[in-house]
Amino acid sequence: MARDGIDLSELDEFTDRLIQSSKEAKKTQRKFLQQQGNKLKRKTLAQMRLSEVNELTGNYKSHIKRGKVWKREDGAQAIRVYSNAPHAHLIEDGHKQLVNPGKGKGNGHGVIPGRGIGHKPKDGKKDYVEGRKVFLNAYKDMAPEYGRACEEAIDEMIRKI
């Protein structure tokens, strides 16, 4: 190419490095998102302890998981932290308090067949349990830290080019 007076060898070398770095960037992005997902999971578990979700909530703690990295419809990669416990939405969002009618006299355990699941509490007792918003609060705590980590990761990828 030097015969025309323009040498594009450096430009070709730079484009080759850009192509190679874009292939490496996919792996780096995936690893970065997995690490951030793990951090969000730890923050969620810490938030669960702070919001005083007690041990009587079944397997709520053990069902909090980090999902896989996936591609959204707009082409961006994403990861999520979720709970696959069947009662997680009740703890997160709140619910109406129902009292189990029980089997005759006694401590109120069990369901009398044909009577349904329960009834609302009487005598001025609280009839709605507020949600703990564990995942929302963990997300809010993680957002600024995640922004800084993204900036650092982008700067690191640019330095490698």
Image (cartoon, grey):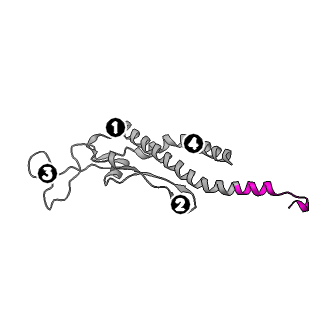
Q: Which residue is mark 2?
A: 72
Q: CA distance from mark 1 to mark 3?
A: 28 Å
Kind of residue at badge 4: Ala
Q: Report the side of 156 relative to 35 (left or right).
A: right
Spot occupied by residue 122 in the image (x, y as percentages of width and height): 21, 46
Q: CA distance from mark 2 to mark 4?
A: 21 Å
The residue sitting at 54% across, 56% down in the picture is 77
Residue 15: say if magenta: yes
Q: Kindly report which numbered mark, 3 or 4, lies closer to the viewer in this rendering.
A: 4
Q: CA distance from mark 2 to mark 1?
A: 34 Å
Q: CA distance from mark 3 to mark 4?
A: 53 Å
Answer with mark 2 or mark 3, whichever residue precedes in sequence. 2
Q: Which residues are magenta?
A: 1-16
Secondary structure of the residue carrying tag 3 is loop
Answer with mark 1 or mark 3, whichever residue precedes in sequence. 1
The residue sitting at 57% across, 50% down in the picture is 28
Q: Is residue 58 above or below residue 5?
A: above
For disc 3, the neighbor class at 10 Å (few under 14, some 14 to 19, many from 20) is some
User: For this rendering, which residue is in front, 97 or 140?
Assistant: 140
User: For this rendering, which residue is in front, 79 or 3?
Assistant: 3
For disc 4, the neighbor class at 10 Å (few under 14, some 14 to 19, many from 20) is some
